[in-house]
Image (cartoon, helix red, strand yellow):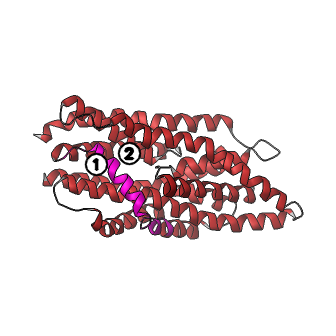
């Protein structure tokens, strides 16, 4: 049991680091391209605010705890399930970073959990405890909400912003856009910590409880500190390959539209997290908000072929991690004893 817990914790630390490394691009991409922030300042800002966001929203953490406890079996089987899910999420994160694709680490981990859960049920290691409900609530509904709401919200925010800027010179409008981006960058990073930081901290707690260590939600502060440090470290390193995809290859925006897109994405993550406790992906929220803002420009600046490619990777994320995690669980099942 001790060996399995150590391996699971090491994989958790890797996934947490990769989460920050992979998703730092969401917050800094357009801010750096439009010179709202320098790369150095941008990475420090997002790392600090993501760490701060990890300490917020106890209610959201409790909602995630219920989902994870539903998905993990007690004892060694639960730790093997966690290892399979984390390993599949880590492999997909590294592959998509190499490909420069802004995919959801949230959906990668949940896809891996569902895959391990199905494999465990198949092997008779646990009963069917609502696997398809987990898939629906953790992946399908949040994905649909994000894809539909984020671009629409971005357009609705951009229309009054453009009207208010109608008498401003282009230089003045760009300056206001850069200021809004600097503020919204911090908000997106904070929302990322609120979502991914809380989720990862709770997952570590549930793993230790699965191993029988007796931690509960009252001990969350220690788990949050560890998560914030590792997540922030990953963001400080940053995944600049994906930054180029978001700011140049996918869509090119002026500073004002980029700023309003960041505002809309942060609002969606905050509202979805606090009001409905949905695991909204900050990656998908930022990406679709940028696309929505791009549609408000006179000249088409959205790379449609690239947008379809990104959407394909989003759909592949839960499928690939599901399959890889299921195979890994079956391969590691002899460790359960």
Give how far apart the Cα atoms at labels 2 and 1 are: 14 Å
**Helix or strand or loop: what does disc 2 sit on?**
helix
Magenta: main secondary structure equals: helix
Q: Residue at x 26, y 32 (%)?
A: 119
Report the magenta residues as a range: 49-74
Residue situated furthest top in the rendering: 122
The foreground one among 219 and 181 is 219
Give the number of the disc on residue 69: 1
Quadrant holding the C terminus: top left
Q: Residue pushed farthest left? A: 337
Checking the image for residue 221, the label placed there is none
- The reply to whether the C-beta atoms of the residues labelled 2 and 1 are less than 8 Å apart is no
Residue 186 visible in the displayed image: yes
What residue did someone put label 2 on?
109
Q: Secondary structure at mark 1?
A: helix
Residue 74: % across, % down: 18, 46
Residue 71 within the segment the image draws in magenta: yes
- Is the residue marked by circle 2 packed among few (<14), some (14-19), or many (20+) residues within 10 Å? many
* Left or right of 171, for residue 115: left
Circle 2 or circle 1, nearest the eye: 1
Across and down, in percent, residue 217 comes to 29, 63
Image point (50%, 49%), residue name: 281
The single residue placed furthest to the right in the displayed view is 167
> Of label 2 and label 1, which has the lower sequence position?
1
| Residue 65 drawn above or below residue 133 | below
Q: Is residue 140 left or right of residue 225?
A: right
Where is residue 118? Give x, y as percent: 29, 33
């Amino acid at each position: 049991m001790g060996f399995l817990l150590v391996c699971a914790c090491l994989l958790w630390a890797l996934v947490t680091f990769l989460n920050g490394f992979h998703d730092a691009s969401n917050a800094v991409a357009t801010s750096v391209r439009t010179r709202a922030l320098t790369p150095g300042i941008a990475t420090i800002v997002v790392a600090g605010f993501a760490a701060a966001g990890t300490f917020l929203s106890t209610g959201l953490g409790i909602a995630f705890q219920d989902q994870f406890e539903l998905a993990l079996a007690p004892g060694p089987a639960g730790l093997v399930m966690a290892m399979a899910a984390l390993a599949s999420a880590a492999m997909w994160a590294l592959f998509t970073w190499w490909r420069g694709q802004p995919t959801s680490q949230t959906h990668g981990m949940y896809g891996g959990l569902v895959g391990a859960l199905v494999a465990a049920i198949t092997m008779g290691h646990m009963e069917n405890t609502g696997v398809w409900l987990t898939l629906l609530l953790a992946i399908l509904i949040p994905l649909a909400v994000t894809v539909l709401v984020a671009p629409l919200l971005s357009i609705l925010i951009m229309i009054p912003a453009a009207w208010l800027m109608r008498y401003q010179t282009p230089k003045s409008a760009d300056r206001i856009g850069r200021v809004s981006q600097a503020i919204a960058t911090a908000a997106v990073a904070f929302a990322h910590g609120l979502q991914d930081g809380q989720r990862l901290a709770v997952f570590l707690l549930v793993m230790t409880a699965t191993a029988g260590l007796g931690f509960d939600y009252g001990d969350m502060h220690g788990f949050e500190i560890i998560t914030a440090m590792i997540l922030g470290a990953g963001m400080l390193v940053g995944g600049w390959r994906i930054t180029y995809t978001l700011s140049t290859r996918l869509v090119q925006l002026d500073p004002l539209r980029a700023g309003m897109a960041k505002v809309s994405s942060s609002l969606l993550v905050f509202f979805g997290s606090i009001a409905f406790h949905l695991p909204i992906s900050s990656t998908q929220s930022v990406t679709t908000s940028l696309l929505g803002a791009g549609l408000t420009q006179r000249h088409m600046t959205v790379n449609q072929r690239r947008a379809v490619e990104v959407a394909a990777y989003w759909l592949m994320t839960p499928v690939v991690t599901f399959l890889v995690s299921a195979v890994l669980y079956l391969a590691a099942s002899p460790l359960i004893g």
